DNA sequence: AATGAATGAGAGTTCATTCAT
DNA sequence: AATGAATGAACTCTCATTCAT
């Protein structure tokens, strides 16, 4: 029994190494930089070996995607300590944006690619959905606290999420580059604050 | 003169046919599905012929992109008739979303691709920027009318644009597929309305 | 009759323009820079037109080659004024080298290409042969003047020609680049002088 | 260990096969006749396979080039046995010429192509330079022995090398085809002898 | 005489993937 | 479990040349 467990552990380790290598390549040079060959070279195994641990290239990217969600969710969990719901939402949003801008490639993979997550059925969307649920919970708290006008929590959450995702996406793709560098952060902050504006503000 | 004009027309027609073919392929399977070969096959010409009308593959995608902007801007111009600024903004936003959802691939090309528009300098961003400026003008009108709290028009415009873009992007990429189909439209409407909520609403 | 003559003149002019354009392109960027398209563009005619005046690309290069020989022969003719045969040979050689280095591309075409002159029969070699004959005549004069040991003029001429051509070729192809730039000219001069050394020198 | 060695041998064999195929194609129809596809067809492998053994087409030609230099240098080494410096030079020269005429295409690649060796800096010219150095050493011996007039060894060596290269090049390119076939060899011999003529000869 | 649209063949190169060992 | 040689299909793009007009 010890043997089969060790084997399992070895296999998991190998998967990790492959994912780690893929991630580094991915961050460095984008999707096209991740070739099965280059991953193999990085972990010093042969290309064929990778296929013992992953079905194909897409499978690898998918796992990378899920890893990204896990990191994002871990961030979100840390928010629980913050008592004020609006503050929680605000800090969470900033986290989200920071994550996107620090890991633009991964973020793209997670939220803006069809290739990897594909047109999969609704059930496979578990990861993005889970991330959203956490977010939505915070929104609901704001509604309950009377910070936003009564509305469906989901609707409001979607609006806020869309704003965040939109900002992230526009920034990553350089579509806000017309803004002067120095005012960029301020504008982003204000834009997000505008979305969070309370009633009567 | 009749001859040269006919030739010009023929050439324009050919460009149209190529763009049309490229578009169809693009919509079907994304950027990678558009190969010079496949376009050629679709229009029943040899691959080389395409290079008589376009510099290279990127040129084609760029033109497709510009066509998209033209259509979008044309839509925007039609808004001028609407007197009420908030209504104008609201209708404009819905237009924008509808455009994105009706031409998802093109929309992606326009606002969410690095490949085609590239990492061009701020001055080359003319087309997306122009679209934004029209939008920003409407936002300013709302501010002037006291609908939103006094704030920098640009900031507010970016926030609203980001929301729209975020909604479009999430929808296109199927990230909101967890919503029941029948409530989708309502939710989107409400989400956008939330973003546009007036002071004290 | 006037008409047909004008037409002949026009045709000749056209051939000249094409050759001129081809030459410029050739000198600028080598053989690969001369495409039928580029020639056509330069003379502002369509590619097809060129085929009305030349059989094909090779034909053009061949004519360019012959032009080169004509220029070289013109140079040689100017030598007749020099009385001293060794001096004549020396000056001629320097001319030859200078021509090669000033027109490296053309020189290559003339003396170091199979593609253009091809494996043509001995009779088509008229031009290079003629150039050689002029050279050989000067060599013979040296022999007659007792400057070189008695030997067949042709043999001696070939030896000297080979040296010149070898120098030209090595220089053009950069195979003497290991020599310090400043001593290059001196070495070339001395090398050629060595070949021309008189008996007992 | 036996296995890895066999693999090494197999790989070396494969490289040889590719080079051999490339060489044959090269000799048949020059540089342009060597296409990756044609090599692949000749060795009955797929085009991609070649890239497992060589970086690209130029790499293959480069190796062919180096092989040529190795063979030439091997020839040169064999000269050491000859005591008389002039004789050594003479035999060496004949070797050189014979090599050039027996391997005209390779010779061209080695000494008269920019494409393969390129416009590399002076230090990359190692191979041609090395060949020249051996040659220059023999020339120096002749000078030391008083066979040629005192002069810089390098200058003299260049003069002689140029003659050899010139003869080789003119012959390869058929520029001496006007000579009657039967006297060709005699003339070449004499021409080279003329270049080697001693003082007072 | 001139056009210029069109072709067809082909170039080098890259890659995910497979499979005998 | 791991290899790594091999594939085959695909890619973008270029060019000399032709021919109906």
Image (spheres, coloured by chain):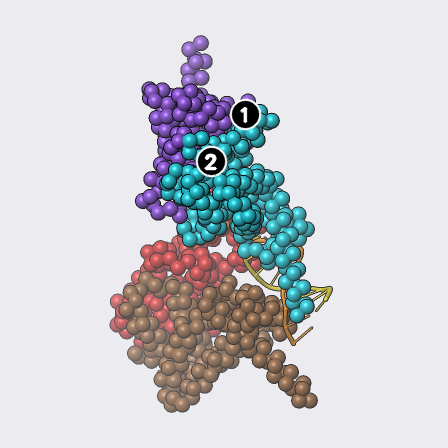
Chain colours: A purple, B cyan, C brown, D red, E orange, F yellow
The C terminus of chain B - image quarter: top left
Residue at 59% from the left image edge and 71% from the top image edge: C45
The image shows residue C142 at horizontal and vertical percentages of: 39, 84
Quick one: SS at disc 1?
A: loop
Q: Quadrant of residue B30?
A: top right
Please state which of residues B107 and D7 is positioned toward the viewer in this rendering. Answer: B107
The image shows residue D184 at horizontal and vertical percentages of: 51, 71
Residue at 47% from the left image edge and 80% from the top image edge: C71
- Check the image and report above or below for B73 versus C36: above
The image shows residue E21 at horizontal and vertical percentages of: 53, 28
The N terminus of chain B - image quarter: bottom right
Parent chain of label 2: B
- Check the image and report above or below for C33 versus A27: below
- Check the image and report above or below for C118 versus C12: above
According to the image, label 2 marks what residue? B196
According to the image, label 1 marks what residue? B178
Asked whether residue A6 appears in the rendered view, the answer is yes
The image shows residue B62 at horizontal and vertical percentages of: 53, 50
Please state which of residues A39 and D44 is positioned toward the viewer in this rendering. Answer: A39
- Check the image and report above or below for B70 versus B104: below
Quick one: SS at disc 2?
A: helix
Q: Quadrant of residue C39?
A: bottom right
Parent chain of label 1: B
Asked whether residue C125 appears in the rendered view, the answer is no
Q: Earlier in the sequence, mark 2 or mark 1?
A: 1
């Amino acid at each position: 029994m010890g043997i089969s467990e060790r084997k399992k552990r070895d296999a998991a380790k190998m998967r990790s190494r492959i994912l780690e290598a893929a991630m580094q390549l991915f961050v460095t040079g984008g999707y096209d930089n991740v070739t099965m060959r280059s991953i193999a070279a990085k972990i010093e195994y042969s290309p064929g070996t990778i296929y013992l641990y992953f079905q194909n290239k897409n499978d690898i990217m998918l796992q990378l995607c899920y890893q990204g969600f896990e990191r994002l969710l871990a961030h979100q969990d840390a928010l629980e300590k913050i008592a004020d719901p609006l503050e929680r939402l605000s800090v969470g949003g900033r986290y989200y944006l920071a994550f996107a801008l620090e890991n633009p490639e991964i973020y793209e993979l997670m939220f803006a690619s069809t290739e990897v997550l594909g047109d999969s059925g609704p059930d496979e969307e578990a990861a993005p959905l889970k991330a959203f649920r956490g977010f939505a919970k915070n929104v609901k708290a704001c509604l309950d606290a009377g910070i936003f006008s009564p509305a469906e929590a989901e609707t409001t959450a979607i609006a806020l999420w869309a704003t965040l995702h939109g900002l992230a996406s526009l920034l990553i793709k350089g579509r806000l580059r017309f803004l002067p560098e120095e005012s960029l952060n301020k504008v982003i902050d204000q834009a997000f604050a505008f979305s969070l504006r309370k009633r009567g503000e």
